[in-house]
Image (cartoon, rainbow, N blue to C red):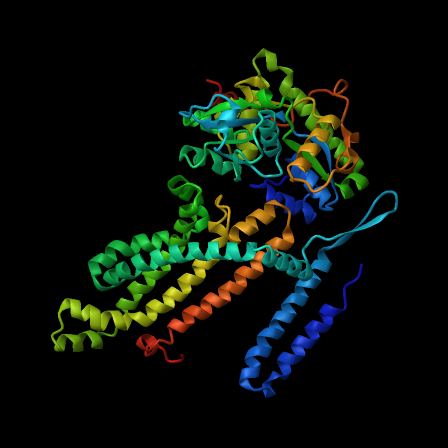
Amino acid sequence: MAQRFGDFPSMKEALIARQIDATFMIAPLAMKLVSDGVPVRIVYLGHRDGSALAVGADSPFKEFKELAGKRIAIPSRFSNQNLLMARMMKKNGMPPGSIELIEMPPPDMPSALASKALDGYIVGEPHPSKAELGGYGRILFFMKDLWPNFISCVLVVRQEVIDGQRPLVQELVDGIAASGKWLEEDKEQGAAHRKAAAVVVGKMFYNQDPALLEYVLTKPLDRVSYTNLTPPRDTFDEIMDLAVETGVLPRHMAFEEYCDPSFAPELEGLPPVRSFPMPTAEELATVGK
Amino acid sequence: MGYSLWPFLAIAGGIAVILGSRRLGESLQKVVLPLSAAVIGVSLWQLACEFKSYELRAPDGSVRLIEVFPTPWQTLVELARMLQDGTLLRYTIASLYRVAVGFGLAAAIGIPVGLVAGWSTRAYRTINPLVQGLRPISPLAWIPVAILWFGVEDASAIFLIFLSSFFPIITGAMTAVHSIPTVFLRSARNFRLGRAELFRYVVFPAALPQIITSLRMALGIAWLVIVAAEMIAVQSGLGYVITDARNGNNYPRVLAAMVCIGLIGIVLDLGVRQLQKLDEVRWGFSKA
């Protein structure tokens, strides 16, 4: 059974209370849960890239350095967006704390930018696109510019379920991999699959404007990617180093302690699978002008 | 996994004290009864924690006890930590400041407007539907609006507190004037009081007891709303502690802040109740 949550804390609490068995969540939050003794593991990634740094449409910023002293919203201190900001500040020789980072629920970010309460925000889609489409924001950086193959959300499963229901977890992971493969399959030939997904997912799951999701998925096509989702040890080690360095996590943990990549399927043998009914022509006509 | 013994003993003891308190003097009862209720509450809390914790058996046979919920003891330790590092005092002041400004503005605007609207039928007809229509909207719903208008600073939080206390105050003031016994007004007219004098010497004092009751209610609501108000990206306050600790997985701190908000609520209510003991308003109450 699927259950939609409006924020990460509630989802985390449902996971702790064993009300849900598996969920997508931001990677460092999953690591933090493990370090706090919550028995969960990361088994797969949700997507790659898919975040952007949005600033005011009329703002003068061109380079990362110019954000010194500005106020940028992040979704959570336990987000890779936060760690990415730390990584970029370090890379640009800026002392930690030289950008004011504030935590904010992602849905509030576009309106906060519009009212100039923020100089910018860095978060997963569709929130950066919303500012772009609304005309009051522009994308300063896509993730591919700052941290290629950025990991944002990961699939987290409770240890009890991993131990007791392996076939079920495998089916879930295979399903994610197969539908990711389906999304990418016709990417170079018009990306009809992504458009169909925007319509169906917008209506069925997220109650978001399909046109917005279509924009997110297709303009540009590499804003979000859905392949290459096996948890990579080297990137997670780098995330771990950054998290400990910035005080987000209290201690170093070995990859095996919080990650179980044993479910990740070999993509070669896996057929692409569409996991939802195809939208009608009229429904499709609502997007892709 | 089993339960601790002490909560059961404490609950039994608490109940025994409450049942046997009839013979105690009144001043002793005033201390013993609430304390017993608190002891029972804390014991139930402990039992709830133990009920929620579970054992995780790994395939290799090892067993781990997973605690889900912060216990009273963990909460107390966290409270002590907050007291020691100064956050408790600093954040309490920040929250009280926001409530004072928001509630103060609500009273400063709500009482005069409510008095006028209660007195003049046309003003009442104009204002009342608007007030009653806005009153039931939760401050949570106003958060996006507040951010758009006031940004993510103090002003947004204060605005939400203002909203939550303004409507009960204005309603209280309107009703208070409305329900002034006609005999007061008739006798005032017999003394040929002018409009201003009537307001100053009859209407306002007659309405005051009820206004103070509504202020007491409104302050309770203003304090209640502090958590919602400080969910907006402000970086201080007891409500902020809850959101922040929740984001940071520090559940004992969430509970500690909840306990603080409760305790301060008791103090605030005691404070407003002192207002009701003033001579100017005392006559309005059958039981002080």
Above-or-below relation of A14 to B218 = above
Residue at (57, 18) in percent of width and height: A221
Question: As rendered, which of B206 and B264 lies closer to the eye?
Answer: B264
Work out which residue is located at the far left of the displayed protein and give it: B192
Q: Quadrant of residue A258?
A: top right
- Of residue B230 and residue A15, the one placed in the foreground of this image is B230
User: Is B176 on the left or on the right of A201, as rendered?
Assistant: left
Q: Residue at the spot x=65%, y=80% of the render?
A: B17
Query: Would you say residue B116 is visible in this rendering?
Result: yes
Residue A85 placement: quadrant: top right
- Where, by quadrant of the figure, is residue A192 drawn? top right
Q: How many marks?
A: 0
Q: Quadrant of the N terminus of chain A?
A: top right
Q: Residue at x 62, y 15 (%)?
A: A186
Is residue B251 shown above or below B201? above
Q: Position of residue B24 (x, y in %)?
A: 59, 86
